[in-house]
Image (cartoon, rainbow, N blue to C red):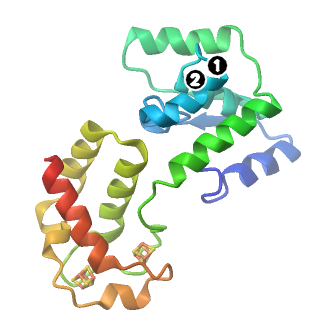
Amino acid sequence: MDKDSQATTKGIELAESLGIPMVIMEPVKGGSLASLPEDIGNIFKESNKDASPSSWALRYVGSFSNVKVILSGMSDMEQVEDNLSTFDSFTSLSGEEQKVVESVAQALNSRVQNGCTACRYCMPCPKGVDIPGSFKIWNEYHVYGNIKDTLRRWNEGIKEETRPKNCVECGKCESVCPQKIHIREDLKRVQREMDVLS
Ligand code: SF4
Ligand code: SF4
């Protein structure tokens, strides 16, 4: 999912060409890739009905030859056993499997609501609205559909005084957004949708 953000894949490939071993953190994206929306999870199932979504994520990062350590947080025995079985009989992704991963990533990315890159050019908002923080949670809610995780992040990460409802629609942020995002409209959608979820 993040292979084009910052120097993810390019960075790994550069390290590979220089013979630098890599340690990978958050291979399952904080658990987001472990429980995918059903229709997207089915893309993996059609390729291999027995493989868990997490195993695809672990095999994806493990397929880079210079990745030597993969650190994955686990919260129950089922996850421990699943991860162990992935590495017990580890095989790199085949070319066909790489295509499956690519199609899952495309399907997930198609659910992003706006192209906020968190550049923060729009900040600070004179009314204190956390614009990129709100958009990040909102976009990831649409991508992964994880209501529990979304509400936890919203309630812990976006304080009342920084929520979109504080926007007075001055337009300052939109005039500097390089992505030309309709920030005011999207902030209204974020607030509305989070209110419904809460
Ligand atoms: S339009 Fe709203 S979010 Fe944007 S700068 Fe003005 S108050 Fe802040
Ligand atoms: S300027 Fe636009 S892209 Fe950058 S953080 Fe603000 S909303 Fe996101």
Q: Amino acid at mark 2?
A: Lys
Image position, residue 71 (x, y; %): 55, 28
Residue on which disc 2 sits:
45
Q: Which residue is mark 1?
A: 48
Q: Position of residue 52 (x, y in %)?
A: 54, 20
| Front residue of 34 and 73 | 34
Residue 178 at x, y percent in the picture = 50, 82
Q: What percent of the width, then of the height, locates residue 162?
A: 18, 67
Disc 1 element: loop
Residue that appears at 24% across and 53% down: 157
Query: Residue 111 or 136: which is nearer the viewer?
Result: 111
Q: Pick the residue in front: 80 or 180.
A: 180
How many discs appear?
2
Task: Look at 45% across and 58% down and name the residue there.
Answer: 112
At horizontal 73% and vertical 30% (from top left) the residue drawn is: 97
Mark 1 and ligand 2: say if the CB distance to the nearest ligand atom is below 8 Å.
Answer: no
Establish if 64 lies above or below 72: below
Residue 114, quarter of picture: bottom left
Badge 2 crowding class, 10 Å Cα cut-off, few under 14, some 14 to 19, many 20 or more, is: some
Q: Is residue 122 above or below residue 157?
A: below
The local crowd at label 1, few if under 14, some if 14 to 19, many if 20 or more residues have their Cα within 10 Å, is: few
- Cβ of disc 2 within 8 Å of ligand 2? no
Residue displayed at 55% across by 47% down: 107
Question: Residues at badges 2 and 1 in contact (C-beta under 8 Å)?
Answer: yes
Task: Look at label 1 and name its amino acid.
Answer: Asn
How far apart marks 2 and 1 lie (CA) works out to: 5 Å
